[in-house]
Each structure stands twice: as structure tokens, then as C-alpha cells.
Image: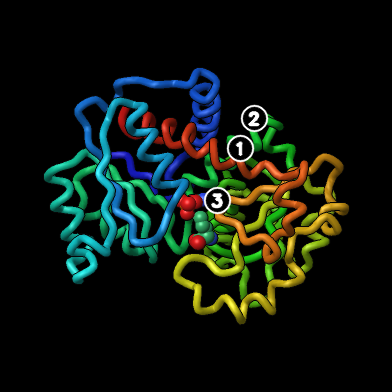
């Protein structure tokens, strides 16, 4: 059976926990192997990337495989060849597809037509590899994830959706503070709650951050929403993660951001560079989690 990884809910609880433990082990062991020897994975990215691209390309190499990176700009995708056709062609050459795109429905369609595993490297709706890696970043400090209070401050975006899904499996108390009109999709929240996740939603950042062990934020306008940036900046001002806001959190609370960050917008320069920030560990952990995900798919 082909294993795809399109959302965190493609994993069951056991698998999600096993991936975090395995990535932690791989990190400590500086793990390399020949699991992917003779295999080529194709990365198809319709949006920019630094971390996701590099961590996947390096992870594949550390597992003995090779990669080809392709964007819509220099391929026929940019001239309207459908993803479903591209998926069928790549399936004839390669052993896996790692895709960064817009709508989740594009990934779903591509997966229907691909004969090889497909990994979601970020869509408008989810960023599962990032959030699994963020769970590793919390786990290595505080292994009992179910005992944690995690705040999300800002846009109810792809990252927020994946944190909501992660709350299903890891059991932390997730408190989201989003401006009115920028909440996560109701269907994502309802599904997670029906599966037992402890998730609350407020418009008040102070309420979400009070007593939190981790405070997460992300850009106010995601890729594809650049034209909304100006309008959003006016609305999102009160959601900036600052030292003042962090005084409400638990002492020793850590601040997380998937990066790239906009200092002076969703978080202050002082917070980004200060002792609470664990953003560089988050970026590093992408590599270890990608290896664990690839091992889960190809073992
Ligand atoms: N966090 C993240 O996915 O970064 P990139 O957009 O650089 O891949
Ligand atoms: N929410 C951001 C995450 C970037 C890694 C975006 O989609 O642009």
C-alpha cells in the first residue's frame, strides 16, 4: 500500500507519536542510511521555499537517494499542463513526489493520479511536515506533550490547521487567538474536536497566551495572500508577540515560528532574538522529521 502524507490526520495516534520519537532518535544519532538507494524523489514547488526544500533534499541524500527540484515556472505546469497529468508522468520516472501548492484539492487530485507516494510540503490548508517537526521541537524539551498548553496567536491559516490536527494526536491544550474573520476553518476545528482534541478559540491574544508553555505565531499574510498584506497589517497589530504579551505566559515559555518571520509584525525583534525564541531549533528539526517521515513511507 502506498503511504501518502497529506495531513497529520493521515497518521494514527501511534504513528504520530512514533514519528516524533524516531525523529528525536535520528537527530541524536545523526542518522544516515541507504534506505533510498536507487530512488529519486521529485519536488514540485509552486510556491517559494528555503527550509522545506533544503531539508527534504538533504534528508533524501542522507538516506541514500536523489532528488530533482521543479517549479511551475520552468516546467509545463506553468503553461497549464494539469497537475494530474504531471503526476502520472512523474510516476513513470520517479519514486516519490513532494509537493508545495495552493489548494488542498490539488494535492488530493494529484494523489489520485500518482502511482507513487505524495507528501504535502505545504498547501493553503495544511503544513503537516512543519507541525510534526514542531512537535519534535516541543518534545525534546517537554516530552509529555499532553501536559502542555500551546498558544497560537495570529492567522487561522495552514499552520494553525495543522496544529489543530496535531492536538488530536498529541493531546496538548491548544488555544488559538485569531482576529474576527481570520479564524481557522470551522470544519477543521469541528473534526478535531470530534476526535477529542482540546482546542479553544478566542479573539483575545492575552486569553490564549495566559499560562502557555509555548506561544506560536506565523506571518499575517501567507504565500498567495501578499496582496492582502496591507489590509491585514491594520487588523493584526494587536496580535503581535511581544515581551509584554509573553509576560502573561508561563515563566520560561518558549516562542515558536515556522519562519520566514517578519520582525516588527507578527513578533518583535526582541522576541525573535531573545531567550524565549526556539526558532532555529525548529528550522533544524525539519531535517530530522523529514527523515522520519521518509522512513515511515519507504520502509
Ligand atoms: N517553514 C517553512 O516551510 O519554510 P520554507 O517556506 O522556507 O520552506
Ligand atoms: N503560513 C505561511 C507558512 C510559511 C512556511 C505560508 O503559507 O506562507
Q: Say which label, 2 or 3, has the lower sequence index.
A: 2
227 or 206: which is nearer to us? 227
Q: Are the two marked residues, 1 and 2, in contact with CB atoms closer than 8 angstroms?
A: yes
> Residue 7: horizontal and vertical position, in percent?
44, 50
Q: Which residue is mark 3?
A: 165
Q: Residues within 10 Å of mark 3 (few under 14, many from 20)?
A: many
Q: Which residue is mark 1?
A: 281
Name the side, left or right, on which 236 lies relative to 293: right
86 or 74: which is nearer to us? 74
Q: Residues within 10 Å of mark 2 (few under 14, many from 20)?
A: some
Q: Is residue 150 visible?
A: no
> Residue 130: horizontal and vertical position, in percent?
51, 46
Mark 2, secondary structure of its residue? loop
Q: Quadrant of residue 261?
A: bottom right
Q: Which residue is mark 2?
A: 140
Of tags 1 and 3, the one toward the viewer is 1
Whether ligand 1 has any atom under 8 Å from the Cβ at mark 2 is answered as no
Distance between mark 1 and mark 2 Cα atoms: 10 Å
Of tags 2 and 3, the one toward the viewer is 2
Q: Quadrant of the C terminus?
A: top left
Q: Are the two marked residues, 1 and 3, in contact with CB atoms closer than 8 angstroms?
A: no
- Who's the residue at 79% across and 58% down the image? 242
Whether ligand 1 has any atom under 8 Å from the Cβ at mark 1 is answered as no
Name the side, left or right, on which 251 lies relative to 151: right
Amino acid at each position: 500500500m502506498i503511504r501518502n502524507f497529506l495531513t497529520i490526520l493521515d497518521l494514527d495516534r501511534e504513528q504520530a507519536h512514533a514519528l516524533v520519537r524516531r525523529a528525536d532518535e535520528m537527530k541524536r544519532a545523526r542518522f544516515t542510511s541507504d534506505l533510498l538507494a536507487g530512488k529519486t524523489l521529485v519536488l514540485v514547488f509552486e510556491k517559494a521555499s528555503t527550509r522545506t526544500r533544503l531539508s527534504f533534499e538533504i534528508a533524501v541524500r542522507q538516506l541514500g537517494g536523489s532528488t530533482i527540484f521543479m517549479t511551475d515556472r520552468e516546467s509545463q505546469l506553468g503553461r497549464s499542463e494539469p497537475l494530474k497529468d504531471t503526476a502520472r508522468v512523474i510516476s513513470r520516472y520517479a519514486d516519490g513526489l513532494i509537493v508545495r501548492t495552493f489548494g488542498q484539492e490539488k494535492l488530493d487530485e494529484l494523489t489520485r493520479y500518482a502511482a507513487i507516494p505524495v507528501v504535502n510540503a505545504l498547501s493553503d490548508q495544511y503544513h503537516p511536515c512543519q507541525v510534526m517537526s514542531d512537535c519534535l521541537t516541543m518534545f525534546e524539551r517537554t516530552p509529555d506533550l499532553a501536559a502542555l498548553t500551546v498558544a497560537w496567536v495570529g492567522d487561522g491559516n495552514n499552520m494553525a490547521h495543522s496544529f489543530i490536527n496535531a492536538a488530536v494526536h498529541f493531546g496538548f491544550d491548544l488555544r488559538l487567538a485569531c482576529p474576527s474573520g481570520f479564524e481557522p476553518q470551522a470544519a477543521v476545528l469541528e473534526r478535531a474536536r470530534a476526535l477529542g482534541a482540546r482546542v479553544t478559540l478566542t479573539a483575545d491574544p492575552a486569553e490564549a497566551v495566559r499560562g502557555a508553555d509555548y506561544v506560536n505565531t506565523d506571518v499575517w499574510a501567507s504565500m498567495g495572500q501578499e496582496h492582502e498584506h496591507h489590509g491585514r497589517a491594520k487588523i493584526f497589530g494587536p496580535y503581535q508577540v511581544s515581551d509584554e504579551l509573553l509576560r502573561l505566559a508561563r515563566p520560561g515559555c518558549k516562542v515558536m515560528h515556522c519562519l520566514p518571520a517578519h520582525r516588527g509584525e507578527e513578533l518583535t525583534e526582541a522576541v525573535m532574538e531573545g531567550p524565549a525564541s526556539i526558532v532555529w531549533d525548529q528550522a533544524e528539526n525539519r531535517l530530522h522529521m523529514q527523515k522520519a517521515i521518509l522512513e515511515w513511507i519507504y520502509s
